[in-house]
C-alpha cells in the first residue's frame, strides 16, 4: 500500500533500532510517555518495544478519547435514549436517536449498562463513522430527534463544528450534539502538575511523544510551553511505527544533550501553526468549559469545549433536561492510574481475569487505543511468559 | 391456476401456508431450478443412495446483508458455505437440503435470482439439493431471505482431518488472499459508500480439497476462515489442539486493495471473513508437496505457508510483524462486521 508501507518498513526500522541502541546511555533509564492512544496502538500492534533497548520504557498516556470519558457522561447519553433507566416515565423520549462512534458503544456505564446494552433494551442507538452520517440521519428522519454523541480531542472537533453549522444553514430543527470534546494541552499540563510527577517522584517522565492527528489541527506551537515551563522534550510524531521509532531516537538525543525542545518528526502533516481554517471554525462555534471531568484525571479546568450561546439550539445539554452526576469508577479498576501513566495494565488485579475485551470493566479495555485493550490483544503473551518464568523460579527455589 | 408472476409478484403469507400457493412456489421456482430425481419424489424427506465411507454432515444458516454483493449473493453463498464445511473433513459433498425463511413482500423476481444462483452453484459443485422447506414471516420480521442449508458427504477411511490434530512443528498454509469477502460486503453498507473493485471470493472448495488430500492424505487440519477470519480460526485450532501458533506477517497474502480498505475502515484483514479460502495444517515434511498441489489448483493459485505450530501452554497465536517486532493475534472481540454470511 503506497504511502503506508514506507512507514512500516522493517529494514529501515532495524537501522533506526541500531542507532537508538548506540545512542542510549546504558547507565540510565529513559521514560517516554506517548500521549496518544494512536501511538499506544501502533507500538503494540507492530511490536515496536521489541526493537527498543531495555532501558527505553514507554509509558502510556491518556490520549484515548473513549478511555477518558467519565461514566457520568455515558450515563447522560443513555438517559437520553433510555429514559426508563433513569427512573423517568418509560417511553417518554421514544423519539430520540443517538448516533455514536462504535468504540463508545461498549464502554461500561452505571447500572450494568452500556450504550450497546441500552440498544438491546430498545433504545435507538446507531453506530456512525462520521458526524456527517448523523446529520444525514436527521435529514432523512425529520420525525426523530437525532443527537450526535460527539467525543474526541482536537481532531474530531472541527467535523462536529461543521455539522452544527450545516444543520443551522439547513434549518434542521431535529438535530443536536452532545458535546464531549476535550483539549490535549490541558491534559498534558495536568499530568505534569500531578503529585506523582512533581512531588512524589513515583512517576518519571523524561519526554513526550506528541500527538499526531491532534497536532495537524493545533500545530506544534502549543507544546512550546511544556518544553519551556517543565523542561520536558516533546517530539510530535505520526502514528506509523517508523514515526514512533524516529521520535524515540529524537527524544533520546534531546535527553542526552540536556535539551528540552519541541521537535516535529511529523513534518509531512504538522506545521507550527496548524490548520488555521479548522481552528477558526472551532473558535467560531465553541467556547471553553470552566472545568470538565476526565476519567483518571478528575475535574480538569478549562479542558473541554461546549457550543457558544448562538448555537445553543444545537446543544443537546441545553435542549434536553440532562443532568451530570460524577460516578466513581469500580474500586478494583485501575483505569484512572493507568490513564495517568502511574500504573501499567498488568498492575491491575482485574486485568485479563474479570476485565477482558469481551467484558470490559474499565474504559481502557474497550477502545483498541486503550492501554489495557492494546496490551491484552497484542502483548499479553509477554506477561504470561514472564509469570511462567517467575513461577518456574519459585518452584525451583521451593524444591 | 395462473402461473406464478415472477416478474412483478411478491412473496405473501400464503406461500408458506402449506396450501396450493406454496405448492405452486415449490413447483415453479424451487423444483424448476433444483430439479433432480430425489427432489422430484416430492416427499417430506429424500431417500438417497450413499457410497461407502463415513458420513459427514454440516449445517449453516445464511443471513447476509445485503443479499446481493460483488462476486455473489446469498444463494451461491448458502451452497458454498455448507459444501466447504463438509469438504473441510476431506470429504466429498453429495447432497444438500435447503430451508428458506422468506419475508412477506419480498419480490419473487429477486427470489428467483437467488434460487437460480443456488442451483447453478450446486450444479457446479456436483451436489444435489434433495429436500427443502419454505416458511414465510410477516413483513418486518425477517430481512428478505434467510437460507439454511445442510450438507451431506462421505469421507474415505484413513482420512483423519480434524481441528485437534495440529502438532508443534506443523506447517500452516493458506489457500490465497485474505479478507476479500468481508471487504466486498462492507463496501455496500449503506453508511459506508466507498467504491471498490474487490469481489467476494465465495467458492466451493471441495475440488481443491480433493487435490490436496490426493497429494497429502495425512493432512492434519483443514478449516475455512469465514467469520472472524484467519485470526479467529487459528485460535480455535490452537485451543482444540492444545498448542500455540507463530505466524510471519510478511508471508500472509492480502490484496493491496483489501489492505487499503481495511486501513481506511480501521479493520485488520486477519479478522475479516473469507468464503472461498482454507487453512491447512500438515507435518513439516509434507508442506512443500501440499503447497505445490494447492498452487496447481485454480482456487489455490496464491497459496502460501504463513507460519508454524508451536508448543505453548497458553495456546497463544503470535505473529512476527513485518516491522520486526512480535505481537499476539488474539480472538476477535465483539463483532467486526455484522451479518456477513
Image (spheres, helix red, strand yellow):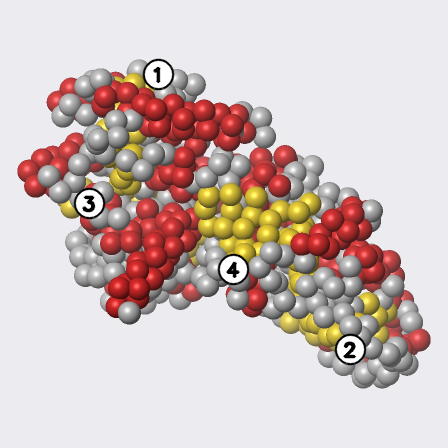
Mark 4 or mark 1, whichever is nearer to me: 4
In the rendered structure, find residue B311 and report the number of the disc placed on it: 4
Q: Are marks 2 and 1 on the same chain?
A: no
Q: Residue at x 73, y 58 (%)?
A: B77
Which residue carries the number 1 mark?
A: A271
Residue A109 location in percent, x, y?
29, 58
The reply to whether dot 3 and dot 2 touch (C-beta < 8 Å) is: no
Q: Residue at x 63, y 34 (%)?
A: B256
Which residue carries the number 3 mark?
A: A342
Question: Secondary structure under badge 4?
Answer: loop
Residue B249 location in percent, x, y?
56, 42
The reply to whether dot 1 and dot 3 touch (C-beta < 8 Å) is: no
Q: CA distance from mark 3 to mark 4?
A: 35 Å
Q: A328 or B316: nearer the eye?
A: B316
The reply to whether dot 4 and dot 2 touch (C-beta < 8 Å) is: no
Residue B272 visible in rendering: no
Which residue carries the number 2 mark?
A: B55
Mark 2 or mark 1, whichever is nearer to me: 2
Q: Quadrant of residue A331?
A: bottom left
Residue A236 location in percent, x, y?
32, 24
Residue B187 visible in rendering: yes
Mark 4 or mark 2, whichever is nearer to me: 4
Q: Residue at x 78, y 59 (%)?
A: B216
Q: CA distance from mark 1 to mark 3?
A: 31 Å
Amino acid at each position: 500500500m503506497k504511502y503506508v508501507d514506507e512507514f512500516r518498513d522493517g529494514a529501515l526500522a532495524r537501522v533506526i533500532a541500531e542507532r537508538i541502541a548506540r545512542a542510549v546511555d546504558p547507565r540510565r533509564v529513559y521514560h517516554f510517555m506517548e500521549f496518544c492512544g494512536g501511538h499506544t496502538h501502533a507500538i503494540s500492534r507492530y511490536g515496536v518495544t521489541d526493537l527498543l533497548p531495555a532501558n527505553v520504557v514507554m509509558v502510556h498516556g491518556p490520549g484515548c478519547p473513549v478511555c477518558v470519558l467519565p461514566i457520568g457522561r455515558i450515563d447522560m447519553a443513555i438517559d437520553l435514549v433510555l429514559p426508563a433507566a433513569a427512573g423517568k416515565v418509560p417511553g417518554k423520549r421514544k423519539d430520540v436517536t443517538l448516533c455514536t462512534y462504535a468504540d463508545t458503544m461498549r464502554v461500561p456505564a452505571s447500572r450494568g449498562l452500556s450504550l450497546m446494552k441500552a440498544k438491546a433494551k430498545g433504545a435507538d442507538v446507531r453506530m456512525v463513522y462520521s458526524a456527517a452520517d448523523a446529520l444525514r440521519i436527521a435529514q432523512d428522519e425529520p420525525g426523530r430527534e437525532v443527537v450526535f454523541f460527539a467525543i474526541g480531542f482536537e481532531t474530531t472537533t472541527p467535523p462536529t463544528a461543521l455539522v452544527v453549522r450545516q444543520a443551522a444553514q439547513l434549518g434542521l430543527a431535529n438535530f443536536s450534539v452532545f458535546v464531549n470534546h476535550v483539549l490535549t494541552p490541558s491534559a498534558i499540563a495536568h499530568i505534569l502538575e500531578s503529585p506523582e510527577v512533581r512531588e512524589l517522584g513515583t512517576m518519571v517522565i523524561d519526554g513526550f511523544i506528541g500527538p499526531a492527528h491532534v497536532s495537524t489541527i493545533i500545530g506544534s506551537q502549543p507544546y512550546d510551553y511544556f518544553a519551556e515551563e517543565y523542561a520536558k522534550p516533546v517530539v510530535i510524531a505520526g502514528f506509523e511505527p517508523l514515526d514512533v521509532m524516529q521520535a524515540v531516537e529524537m527524544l533520546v538525543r534531546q535527553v542526552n544533550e540536556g535539551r528540552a525542545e519541541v521537535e516535529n518528526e511529523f513534518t509531512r502533516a504538522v506545521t507550527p501553526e496548524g490548520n488555521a481554517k479548522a481552528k477558526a471554525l472551532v473558535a467560531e462555534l465553541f467556547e471553553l468549559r470552566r472545568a470538565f471531568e476526565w476519567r483518571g484525571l478528575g475535574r480538569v479546568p478549562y479542558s473541554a469545549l461546549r457550543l457558544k450561546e448562538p448555537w445553543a439550539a444545537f446543544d443537546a445539554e441545553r435542549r434536553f433536561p440532562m443532568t451530570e452526576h460524577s460516578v466513581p469508577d469500580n474500586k478494583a479498576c485501575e483505569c484512572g492510574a493507568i490513564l495517568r501513566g502511574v500504573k501499567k495494565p498488568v498492575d491491575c488485579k482485574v486485568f485479563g481475569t474479570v476485565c477482558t475485551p469481551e467484558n470490559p470493566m474499565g474504559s481502557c479495555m474497550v477502545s483498541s487505543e486503550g492501554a489495557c485493550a492494546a496490551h491484552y490483544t497484542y502483548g499479553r503473551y509477554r506477561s504470561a511468559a514472564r509469570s511462567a518464568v517467575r513461577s518456574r523460579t519459585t518452584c525451583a527455589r521451593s524444591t | 391456476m395462473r402461473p406464478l408472476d415472477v416478474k412483478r409478484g411478491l412473496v405473501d403469507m400464503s406461500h408458506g401456508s402449506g396450501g396450493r400457493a406454496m405448492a405452486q412456489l415449490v413447483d415453479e421456482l424451487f423444483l424448476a431450478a433444483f430439479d433432480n430425481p430425489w427432489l422430484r419424489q416430492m416427499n417430506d424427506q429424500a431417500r438417497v443412495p450413499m457410497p461407502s465411507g463415513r458420513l459427514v454432515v454440516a449445517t449453516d444458516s445464511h443471513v447476509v446483508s445485503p443479499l446481493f454483493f460483488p462476486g455473489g449473493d446469498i444463494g451461491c453463498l448458502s451452497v458454498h458455505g455448507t459444501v466447504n464445511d463438509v469438504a473441510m473433513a476431506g470429504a466429498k459433498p453429495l447432497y444438500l437440503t435447503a430451508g428458506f425463511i422468506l419475508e412477506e413482500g419480498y419480490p419473487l423476481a429477486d427470489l428467483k435470482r437467488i434460487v437460480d444462483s443456488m442451483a447453478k452453484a450446486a450444479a457446479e459443485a456436483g451436489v444435489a439439493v434433495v429436500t427443502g422447506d419454505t416458511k414465510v414471516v410477516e413483513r418486518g420480521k425477517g430481512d428478505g431471505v434467510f437460507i439454511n442449508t445442510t450438507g451431506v458427504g462421505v469421507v474415505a477411511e484413513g482420512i483423519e482431518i480434524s481441528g485437534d490434530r495440529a502438532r508443534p512443528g506443523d506447517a500452516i498454509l493458506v489457500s490465497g488472499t485474505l479478507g476479500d469477502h468481508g471487504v466486498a460486503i462492507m463496501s455496500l453498507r449503506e453508511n459506508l459508500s466507498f467504491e471498490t473493485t474487490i469481489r467476494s471470493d465465495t467458492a466451493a472448495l471441495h475440488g481443491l480439497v480433493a487435490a490436496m488430500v490426493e497429494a497429502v492424505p495425512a493432512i492434519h487440519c483443514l478449516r475455512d476462515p469465514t467469520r472472524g477470519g484467519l485470526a479467529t480460526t487459528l485460535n480455535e485450532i490452537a485451543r482444540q489442539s492444545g498448542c500455540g501458533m507463530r505466524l510471519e506477517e510478511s508471508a500472509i497474502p492480502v490484496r493491496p486493495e483489501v489492505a487499503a480498505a481495511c486501513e481506511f475502515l480501521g479493520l485488520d484483514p486477519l479478522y475479516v471473513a473469507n468464503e472461498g479460502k482454507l487453512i491447512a495444517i500438515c507435518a513439516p515434511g509434507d508442506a512443500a508437496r501440499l503447497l505445490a498441489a494447492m498452487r496447481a489448483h485454480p482456487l489455490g493459485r496464491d497459496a502460501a505457508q504463513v507460519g508454524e505450530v508451536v508448543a505453548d501452554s497458553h495456546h497463544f497465536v503470535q505473529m512476527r510483524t513485518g516491522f520486526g517486532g512480535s505481537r499476539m493475534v488474539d480472538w476477535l472481540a465483539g463483532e467486526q462486521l455484522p451479518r456477513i454470511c
